[in-house]
Structures are given as structure tokens and as C-alpha cells.
Image (spheres, rainbow, N blue to C red):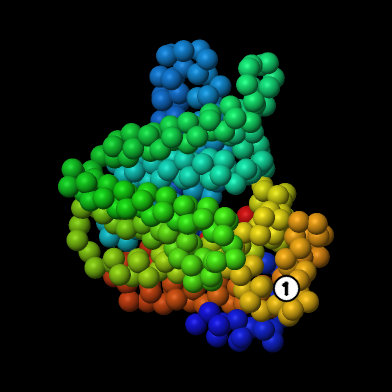
Amino acid sequence: MLGAVANDTLAGQPHDVLCPPPQRSAPPADGRLRAAIDTTLADFLRHESAILESTDTALRPFAALARDSVLAGGKRLRPTFAHWGWRGVAGPAPAVDPVLPAFAALELLHAFALIHDDVMDGSATRRGRPTAHEVLAAQHAQAGRQGPADRFGTAGAVLIGDLCLVWADRLLARADVPAPALLAARRCYDEMRVEAIAGQYLDVLGDAEPDRWSVDRALRVARLKTAGYTVTRPLLFGAALTGQSAPVGDAYLRYGNAVGEAFQLCDDLLGVFGDPAVTGKPAGDDLRTGKPTVLLLLARRLATPAQATQLAQTDSADLSRIAEIVTDTGAVAAVEAMIDNRVGTALAALDRAPIDSATDAALRALAVMATHRQS
């Protein structure tokens, strides 16, 4: 199928704007939901930070950085998908307050993943701000402590990521739902974490042996690392929190995998062509490191011999020129077509899903918003 997608799009011209803003309206109640998630997180983190700080005053900057890493921006996509996964089964009647801690816990899990990912990638910025390991290294140097600042920063950031993972468990336990429902959600939550870690390992492995990677494998990584814990598992997690047995699992699975893969494909485009002022991350890192993303793997597959030679010279080449070559190969158009194809698959999965009209509208809007974006 990938070859067919690539061939079908080679004659077309790439879009002028990659991952453009969606044309659909925002999901219903999105603003209110995000505010409720942020309030839940802020209250929880205030309490947990106070406990840490009371143990030893030296933990204040550590606790503050952990708190800021969670609260400083972000799309809150995972709690949002979890909410609509729950709403699709629970219906409009039940109050959302009892399950808000469970939804918000996914944001702490996300913070854990991002902080560790930044350490593994050696990233300097995240959401337009220095990454946790960079902040800690700077604090170490400024304080005149012994030992290498970068080593301290890495060690401290790993611990902050670990702390966010523990905090996620503690916040999840605050959900006010019957024990069987919480246990069912916990099983889904554990599967989500195992898949994300497996996907992250494969991502690291791909960086170490890019010449042995394939488009199929890159998509498998996307399903594990991105689709699973961004869309699919949050939807199923939300449904499990209802404690009800509803025939939505297959629709959520097909929708989630399609949207999650498209989300990662859009990230691949933004990693090369995104505006750092909007994405909060430097552009061109994937080109510089030769990361085996679907975009770059397709570019190498579709390149002429001359283009292939230039694509292999990222160490010393002008990255903007390399980006032009990636576009010229037809890889950008191919990836954009793959995104559109997956969004279509996701929307088709909702056609017969046993969910109410509000949930259907929200998930359709989210499918477009998550995959046609600029950050």
C-alpha cells in the first residue's frame, strides 16, 4: 500500500503549507475540558510539590521544574481523547468530575515520556523552553557544584521523568469510580505504558541502525510510541472508566490507530519544515541526525541517484537545501497523502460506531485537528 500511495502522489505538487490549520471547528466543550484538566493538574501538583519541599529545601527547584514541565503548555490531547472515549460510552448524563483525575493522569504520563525522550535525543528545547536536563545543567553550573554539569542535568531529568510517572499513578488512583472500572482502566493504562516504552526503544534502535530500517517498521514504531498512547489507548482507557461493556472497542481501535499514525506523520513533516517559533523545537534535527522517519525513508526510496548522494551528506550540507531535495523526491506529497488517507480511515471507523452525535462530532474534529497542525 505504501508504494501505491507514493506512486499515486508523485505527479502532484506538495501543499504550500504543511499540516495546515484544520477547517473544522474545535471539539465541543474543548476549552472547558482543558481548563478542568489544568485545574486538576495544578491542584494535585501543588499538593505533591509541597510534600517534596517539606522533606528538604534542596528539593524546591527539583519539585518546581517537575511541576513546570507538566503545566508549561501542551495540547492536552491525551486527556481529551480519554474524555471522549469515556463520553462515547457514558453518554451526556454522568458528571465528569469523578473521572477528571484519571484523564489528567495521562498528562503526567506524557510529561514522563517527553522528559526522557528529550534526554535520549539530547534536545535543547521543548515547547519553546529549555528542556529539563538543560535547566538542571545550567543550575548546576551556576551553583558551582562539583562534577560535569551535563551529567548532573541528565541524571536529574531522568529522576523528574520518573517522578512524573509515579505522580501519574497517584493521580489515577484518585478517580472516583467503582473498583472494577478502575481496575479495567488500569489494565489499559499498563498496556499503554508498555507499548510506549517498546516503541521508544525501537525509536532509539532505529537511530542507531537507520540503514536497516524500513517504512513498515517506522510505521510500527508510530503505532507503538505515538498512536497507542496518544489516541488509541486513551480512548479505550476512557471507555473502561465507565465500567460498562459497550461495543465501541473495534471502532476506537481503528480510529485511534489511524489518527495516531497520521499524528506521527505530521510530526515527521514538522520536524523538517516546521517553524521553530510555533513548534517550540529546532527545525531540521531529523535531517541532521538522519533519523529514519517515514518521510526520510520515503525520500531515500524515491530519490534519483544524484538526490540520494545529497541526502547522505547531511553532516556538512545546508539543511534547507536537503529539505528542498526531500520535497523534490515526492516524499512530502506522499506523506501528506498518507495523512489524508488515515484521516479518511478514522472518519469511516466512526460511521457505524455506537456513540452519540456529540461524541461523533468531537472525534471527527479531533481527527483533523491532531493531524493537520503547525505544532
Q: Amino acid at mark 1?
A: Ala
Tell me the quadrant of the picture where the C terminus can be found.
bottom right
Residue 352 lies, with reference to residue 157, above or below; the image says below
260 with respect to 332 (left or right)? left
Where residue 74 sits: x, y (%)?
Answer: 55, 46
In which image quadrant can residue 170 be found? Answer: top left
Judging from the image, what secondary structure is the residue with disc 1 in? helix
Residue 212 lies, with reference to residue 115, above or below; the image says below
Report the residue at 50% width, 82% height from top.
1
Report the residue at 67% width, 55% height from top.
289
Residue 164 lies, with reference to residue 284, above or below; the image says above
Residue position for label 1: 308
**Depth check, front residue: 129 or 296:** 296
In which image quadrant can residue 129 be found? Answer: top right
Where residue 233 sits: x, y (%)?
Answer: 36, 57
Crowding at dot 1, Cα within 10 Å, few <14 / some 14-19 / many 20+, comes out as: some
Report the residue at 41% width, 45% height from top.
106
136 with respect to 320 (left or right)? left
Where residue 68 sits: x, y (%)?
Answer: 55, 32
Where residue 88 sits: x, y (%)?
Answer: 32, 61
